[in-house]
Image: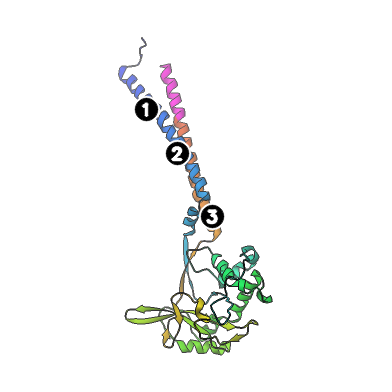
Amino acid sequence: MATNSLPDGQGRDDLEVCKQQMDFFKYGCKFCLNYFIECILLILFEHASPINLFFFTLKIFIYYINSFIIHGLWPSSGKTEGPKNCSSVHFDMNKIKNLTNELQHAWPNIYSNSAPNDFWKHEWKTHGTCALSLNTTGTEYLFFRKTLDLMKKYNASTFLSKMNITPNDTTPYVTKTIESVLQKKLGVMPNLQCYRYKLGKRQTYLLAEIRICMDKQFKLFKCPNGDSTLYWNRLSQTQRCYGGKIYFPEIKKINPLKENHKYMILLNFMRLQFFLCIGYVICCWYNVAHVYVGRNKHDEL
């Protein structure tokens, strides 16, 4: 019968420590290995998961738009709704890549639940494909280039600011004053679209859009008044601004982070997870080695 040469109490303590270490070796390292595998799978899953990319896309920054931006260039039959979706020519961001800076400034996507270029894609598919018959708008690039040029030429913000009509949330303007300024600068009467909402018991109007009508040679003319023509594609909950006073507010734009920011955040988070996994494996390796050394010492005893 083998006997332990150490005192009974110390021997029992050493055996208990060894037992605990072996329990860790049996269960703890199994957990460690599972954790490491799950962690690697988590990284791979998050790298490919649209949900994860969406999560990081929701990181936002806020700034104010205090000038008019482009909504669109819409071909119209002048009689009925449309046309729209006239061709299957797909939107290709690469074709307008060198216009990106101008588009982001003059034609940004103000919808926070979509990617920056989704609005351009929508405008091209819905309206741009109906302008292919004209030489000046016959390609995707020409369509966006022409629209940007028209914005520069007929910039309502410039016309109004020279008459001290600027965006703010407190001072209302007389509708006819805005129309008069624009008519004088453009040579034709534009169409003003307003949001209407109740402020207490009072109806309040917010200037939402200024519409300018032009022919196929892009010469301006007075917009028609029929709802079946001009107003078919208006923003939801807007209507023509009728007399009285209207507010010209700033827009608080909530915009997704740029693509490089999104991936930078994603990469940093993945990197953090990876190093945590590696650190945990090293910790396991250290404890396994400690158990091995402890076992050898116990055997020697």
| Placement of 301 over or under 73, stated as above or below | above
Q: Position of residue 73 (x, y in %)?
A: 58, 76
Q: Earlier in the sequence, mark 1 or mark 2?
A: 1
- What amino acid does circle 2 point to? Tyr
Magenta-drawn segment:
288-301
Q: Residues within 10 Å of mark 1 (few under 14, many from 20)?
A: few
Label 3 sits on a secondary structure element that is: helix
Q: Nearer the viewer, residue 64 or 154?
A: 154
| Residue that extends furthest to the front in the rendered view of this protein | 80
Q: Which residue is mark 3?
A: 263
| Residue that extends furthest to the top in the rendered view of this protein | 1
Distance between the alpha carbons at the discs numbered 1 and 3: 44 Å
Distance between the alpha carbons at the discs numbered 2 and 3: 25 Å
In screen coordinates, is 259 left or right of 5? right
Q: Nearer the viewer, residue 59 or 232?
A: 232
Q: Which residue is mark 2?
A: 35
| Residue that extends furthest to the left in the rendered view of this protein | 9
Q: Residues within 10 Å of mark 2 (few under 14, many from 20)?
A: some
In screen coordinates, is 200 left or right of 96? left
- What amino acid does circle 3 point to? Tyr
Q: Earlier in the sequence, mark 2 or mark 3?
A: 2
Asked whether 296 falls inside the magenta stretch, the response is: yes
Q: Position of residue 132 (x, y in %)?
A: 65, 73
Label 2 sits on a secondary structure element that is: helix
Distance between the alpha carbons at the discs numbered 1 and 2: 21 Å
Q: Quadrant of the C terminus?
A: top left
Q: Residues within 10 Å of mark 3 (few under 14, many from 20)?
A: some
| Placement of 98 over or under 231, stated as above or below | above
Tag on residue 20? 1
Q: Position of residue 24 (x, y in %)?
A: 40, 30
Q: Quadrant of residue 14?
A: top left
Label 1 sits on a secondary structure element that is: helix
